[in-house]
Amino acid sequence: MQKKYIYLIGFLVFGLCFFACRKDPKNPSWDVDILAPLIKSTLTINNIITDSILHQNPDNSLDIVYKYALPAFSVDSLFKIPDTTLKNKYVAPFSATIAPGATIVSQTQNINFVSGGVSLTNVTIRSGYMLFSIKSSIKEVTHLTYILPKVTDPVSGSVFNKTFIIPKGTVSSPGVYSGSFDLSGYKIDLRGTNGTSVNTMIISYTAILDPLAPASVNIAPGDSVVISNSFKDIVPQYAKGYFGHPITSIGPDTSDFPLFKHFINGTLKLEDIDIGLKIQNEIGADARITIDNLSAINTRTANAVPLNGSVIGVPLNINRSVDNSGMVTPSTYSVSFTPSNSNILAFMENLPDKLSYQLSLEINPLGNVSGGNDFIYYDKLMKTEMVMTIPLSFVANDLTLADTIDFNMPSTIDKVNGGNLYLYAENGFPFSADPQIYLMDGNFHIVDSLISAPNSIMAPPLDANLICIGKKATKLTFPITEQKLSKLRATDKMYITMKFNTSDQPKYVKIYSFYEMNIKLVGDFNYTVGKK
Amino acid sequence: MIQGKVLFIFAFLFFRGIEFTFAQDSLPPQKPEQSIELLGEGYITSKTITNRFIKAFYFGEFIDDALKSTVSGKLGAVNRMGADSKWGLTYTFHSLEEKGKPRFSFSFFDRANLNLKFSGDLFKTVFYGNKMFAGSTAALGNFKFNFLRYQQFRFGWDWKGSVTRGSYGIAFSLLSGDRNTGINALRADLFTAPDGTFLDLDLKMDMIQTDTTRKSFFAQNGLGLSADCYYELPYVAWKSPGKITVELKDLGFIRWKSNSMSHQVDSSFHFEGVDVSDIFNLDSSSFTFHVDEALDENTRFVKKRYATSIPFTLDIHTKVFYGKKLAFEKGISWLLNAQARPYYYAKLHFLLGINKSFDVAYLVGYGGYGGFNSGLDVKMDFARHYSLHFIDNYLFSGIAGRSTYGMGMYLKLTRRF
């Protein structure tokens, strides 16, 4: 009997083994030798220079047209509407009985709304607030009507008129009302009560006892109504009046000049250049502007080249603009810097990454010739813009561009065991290009390079007109060794440089829109398929 | 899914109600009985792929060049590999109330079948890479792959014959389809440029695949039917008794559900690398995977139902008895609707013990997916109610230290009541 059970148990164990021994396959791995194209690209001049600043001429040659605006004058440099707080306190001098609806206090006053040496008659507010805080110790509800008779509502056209209900209170525990009103768009007439003043705001308020109060109320000596209102963060959209005769200056200061920010080495000789300096006055006041200094600063070489020319340091008179119901016709002053009237070539060939400047501005140099009809709009001021037209005809000698990019090695590259990358380039540009990719550690220190020498993409031959004849094919090799791969894995930034040398130096060569370079990156490497 | 399971349960109860039984591949009962069999069998074999390679692949090992070379040295223009597994149980019932009644059997089996045909270039490209084909074309086509897994609910009737009439049996099966992946690449020519600057692929391929989101056991991605039958006729040749058996197994189909996928490609592709519009801005958004298609209108993908004819076996063999202790069996077995060739085999049986309760046979075979094979076939009764049947077709195939091709085992344990 026992033996029978042993066999039966064995039978069941046998069955269990059948059903339990099945396993799913795991993930095997092996190495393969891959030869395959990875990346292809066609480089045109647009890949090097943003197409928005490229201008194509009828002969397919190209100009860089680059606009650069110097910092503009702001409204603040002419006048300000400062934050203003008005505090009016009515204190009952003696005991009195006030009937429902009877007036407690009524007052009208003028305030100076604008600071600075200007005389404004009208202002439209772009943004800003009026804050109220009213405290009453009168033992009944009080109605306070607050009127700005010369401030017009932007929607209804009616004057600013608000009535506030202040709760009843006591001397020790006054009734309090507080609130704020957005003044955006309100138009303010600053000519005062008689219409001949300037910078003057009229404020009127009246406090009455609640008309629905059940009975008269006794006001004891010392009972008070305190009105505190503030104009805060007022920014004008439009102002009119006489702006005085302010003289302001901008700078000396520097600003970034991004056109050559990636140029780190070498020289660039330009065949021609034209920089138009355009000063556009959209302010309704005459102006006199002086460019005291404009210098090209190359911070890498610590070299500064001041711009010399007939207009530098000389006051330039610019007429006022004309306002046709909000449509402003500006007045413009233009001057051109060329190699014949300035040192503009040296200025640009310094490859500046910063410009330093100093300008002076004098408003109304001839006084109040407009009879108080100067005007200014918030977004229509005085612009100083440089329009640089640089024909792409140059001599580049070891001109080196560089940039740093973030790098995260894709996980698939972890499976590459080594090999080579081949860059096949067909260059149709009249310059050779020497690319290099440097690996950087976390402290921006270069630890290795990827491209082995020779690393020059050769230039094609030129014809008699210095135009490229076809394309020149070059093959560059990037050895990817185990050591390089381990450095690549540790790299999180790459420093990429490209050194250019134009052909047939010292002749200037032009860049045409039809020039291009075909690039293919081919991988020839050993790769582990499956888990590594 | 629930409906399918209910259908199987009802079918089982219906057929169980007809109380006669026998499984055609059960041992002949010595007395009226019921029995339960546990069966597990499986094999994987190829004339090209070595066992060591298969094991390394299956167990996730690293496949080095030495291991690859054991395969690449045997590669031909057309290479085959096949695998099959079957495990489950069978219940048999035989009523002795009336003479001539058949035996009834019910079986449940989990079945899987893999078969593929591939070119030598395909193996080299996959396991060595395409670099060796620089400047030439790798012929990856003439590739067929089919993987099938299903559960089988089988109902069989078996009639014991006489000396003149012969024995015969039939069985019908309901099939619950789990998974199927089929690839048929009639043409796949990959040209690698000598300098690697481009790849050209001329591809004509059909691919079918069942719902990849439903992969669990008994996923019921399809339903099907199959049938088995056999006829066994005794004869006497040169005074020696013998029998000839003709057997057809697993003739049937599975119809897969509508969320199955069908890909059809008949195109030429030219690849020159990922197109980077701005080489100075290596942001992934500026990358465009760009493949020029010469004939892209012939590429389509649809979700639809489809039917698969499952691989079936035609087996014809004879067995002649020479005295009481010796028998010789020879036959041909052909797995059709797969990539296998006919398989020829012979067995020399030694019948030992009382009532021939121990049958050991030396077997040799050739064909199928592989080449020559040699092994043992052992049947034995033990402990009164138990029988064990063990077959290893490849037991002696790897003698003399040569690379072995093919491995597998058949094991059946029977408990009679």
Image (tube, coloured by chain):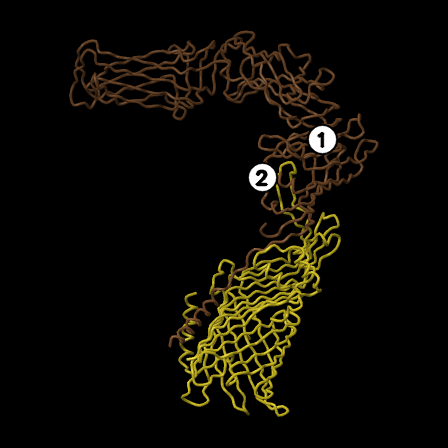
Chain colours: A brown, B yellow
Neighbours of disc 1 within 10 Å: few (<14), some (14-19), many (20+): many
Q: Is residue B4 above or below residue B29?
A: above
**Which chain letter matches label 1?**
A
Q: Say left or right for A344 vs A283.
A: right
Amino acid type of disc 2?
A: Asn
Circle on res. A408: 2
Q: Is residue A367 left or right of residue A453?
A: left
Q: Which mark is residue B345?
A: none
- Kind of residue at disc 1: Lys
Element assignment for label 2:
loop
From this view, report whether residue B310 is shown above or below residue A349.
Answer: below
Residue A86, image x, y percentages: 34, 14
Q: Secondary structure at mark 1?
A: strand
Label 2 crowd bin: few (<14), some (14–19), many (20+), radius 10 Å: few
The residue lying toward the viewer, choosing from A431 and A151, is: A431
The image quarter in which residue B80 lies: bottom right
Provide the residue designation for mark 1.
A499
Q: CA distance from mark 1 to mark 2?
A: 25 Å
